[in-house]
Amino acid sequence: MKRDKPSKLVRLLFWLGVILVLSWIFLWSGFSFYKVWKIDRQVKRLERELSQTQAQNDSLRRENNRLKTDPAAAEEIAREQFGMIKPNETIWRFKPATPSPDAKKGGK
C-alpha cells in the first residue's frame, strides 16, 4: 500500500504550528525561557545590592558600637564634624595658599 505525500499546505501548516508552539515556549508564555532569564538576571543584581547593603550596615553597626563604647572616638567625631572644643582651647584654621598672579602666568 502506497501512502500519499501530505500536500504542501498541510506541511506548511504543520511547520507554522511547530514554530508557533516553540516561539510560545521560548518567548511569550508566563514561564518562557526569555522571562526566566530576565528574572534570573534581576535576582542576581538584587543579590549583589543586598550584599553591598549588608556590608554597609555591618560597617555602620561597628561604627555605632565604637562611638557608644569608646569616648575617644566620640570626642573625635564631636571635634571633626561639629567643631566642638575643650574649655580654654584655641583652634587654628589655615586656608590653602593661593598662587600669585605671576605664578599663574608662568612668570618668575
Image: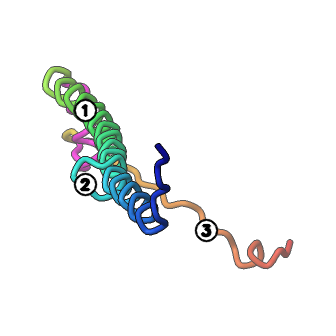
Q: Which residues are magenta?
A: 71-85
Q: Which image quadrant for residue 105?
A: bottom right
> Given this view, does label 2 or label 1 mark the residue nearer the observer?
2
Residue at the extreme top of the image, as rendered: 69
The residues tagged by marks 2 and 1 sit, at their Cα atoms, a distance apart of 35 Å
Tag 3: amino acid: Thr
Checking the image for residue 74, the label placed there is none
Q: Position of residue 35 (x, y in %)?
A: 31, 51
SS for callout 2: loop
Q: Nearer the viewer, residue 102 or 17?
A: 17
Q: Position of residue 91 (x, y in %)?
A: 34, 48
Q: Are marks 2 and 3 in contact (CB under 8 Å)?
A: no
**Residue found 31% across the figure and 45% down from its top:** 36
Q: Position of residue 11 (x, y in %)?
A: 45, 60
The residue wearing badge 1 is: 54
Tag 2: amino acid: Ser
The residue wearing badge 2 is: 29
**Quadrant housing the C terminus:** bottom right
Crowding near pointer 2: few (<14 within 10 Å), some, many (20+)? few
SS for callout 3: loop
The residue wearing badge 3 is: 98
Q: Earlier in the sequence, mark 2 or mark 3?
A: 2
Compared with 26, 20 (above or below) is below
The residues tagged by marks 1 and 3 sit, at their Cα atoms, a distance apart of 43 Å
Q: Earlier in the sequence, mark 1 or mark 3?
A: 1
**Residue found 23% across the figure and 25% down from its top:** 62
Q: Earlier in the sequence, mark 2 or mark 1?
A: 2
In the image, is 94 to the left or to the right of 20? right
Residue at the extreme right of the image, as rendered: 108
